[in-house]
Amino acid sequence: MIENMKGLLLDDRWAPVTSEMGFLEAGAEHAARAFAAWQGGLFGGITVEVRSVSGSLEQALSTLLPLTDMERRRYLFVPTRSAWTAYVDNGWRGTDVFGPVSYMAERLGCRGLRVVAVPNTIQKDKGRYGAVMLEMFGPRRTTGLNYVRTLAVSNDGGRWVFDQSGEPFSFEKLEQYQARRLRDRFTFDMLKEYLRHLGLSPFEEDFYLPEGAPAWLVERKSPVSPKHKEYTLAQVREDF
């Protein structure tokens, strides 16, 4: 069910930062430094710094604060107990995975994932529109983009939709995609099961930072726009 998502990462305390997460099948430091080089090339004349971050997962996430709205300025790469590195950023509406992770999958020659899990709590303009999504990107483009497989159930402004594309994985429950209720066609439990088949347990805190390995923070040091605004985590969660 999307309405009752028990077992979200850190009890969802870091939503919307962790409501959408990216994963790259590469080492954390390697991914962070490659990302910093890309960012520095995109925005000539700016400084992009990379530094290691020690401590717990929540301490690592806190380095993203404050959250910003005009442009993202901090990006975190977190090693896991697998071949995958997690990616989140400091956007005030949550992490933007598609552009960075799809591109970095090509740049690093690896697979990338976009994982979305948002409880459906919307009531009278308060709360969140629910969504469960899994997208895999490959190291090469085939039809203009490098999608390998996509699955998504979401509340699109009050209307539930189900979408899929690409070749199904061998472990998928294809019969479930025929469920009468659209929101039952791809559930949070199914998302977790599919991710386990891919070697990930992203909703479990101990999946991250194995054996004291540091996370890596990439930070842009360029001047900010006059319209630039900053927010605390509590401020962006007020509408939840």
Image (cartoon, rainbow, N blue to C red):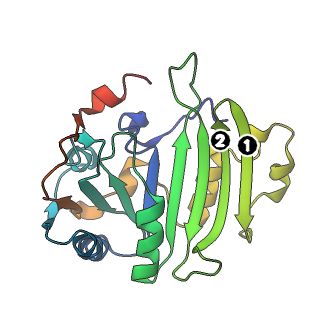
The front one of 97 and 216 is 97
Residue 81 visible, this orientation:
no
Q: How far apart are marks 1 and 2 (CA)?
A: 6 Å
At x 23%, y 64%, the residue is 213
At x 61%, y 45%, the residue is 132
Q: Report the amino acid beneath label 2.
A: Ser
Spot occupied by residue 144 in the image (x, y as percentages of width and height)? 60, 76
Residue 198 sits in which quadrant?
Answer: bottom right
Among all residues in the image, which is located at the extreme front? 226
Task: Using a 10 Å C-alpha cutoff, classify the residue at mark 1 as few (fewer than 14 neighbours), some (14 to 19) or many (20 or more).
Answer: some
Q: Is residue 224 left or right of residue 165?
A: left
Q: In this view, does 199 lie to the left or right of 38?
A: right
Task: Using a 10 Å C-alpha cutoff, classify the residue at mark 2 as few (fewer than 14 neighbours), some (14 to 19) or many (20 or more).
Answer: many
Residue 40 sits in which quadrant?
Answer: bottom left
At x 44%, y 72%, the residue is 103
**What element does badge 1 sit on?**
strand
Q: Where's the C terminus, which quadrant? A: top left
User: Which labelled disc corresponds to residue 154?
Assistant: 2
Q: Tally the numbered discs.
A: 2
Residue where numbered disc 1 is placed: 161
Whether tag 1 and tag 2 are in contact, CB under 8 A, the answer is yes
Q: Report the amino acid beneath label 1.
A: Val
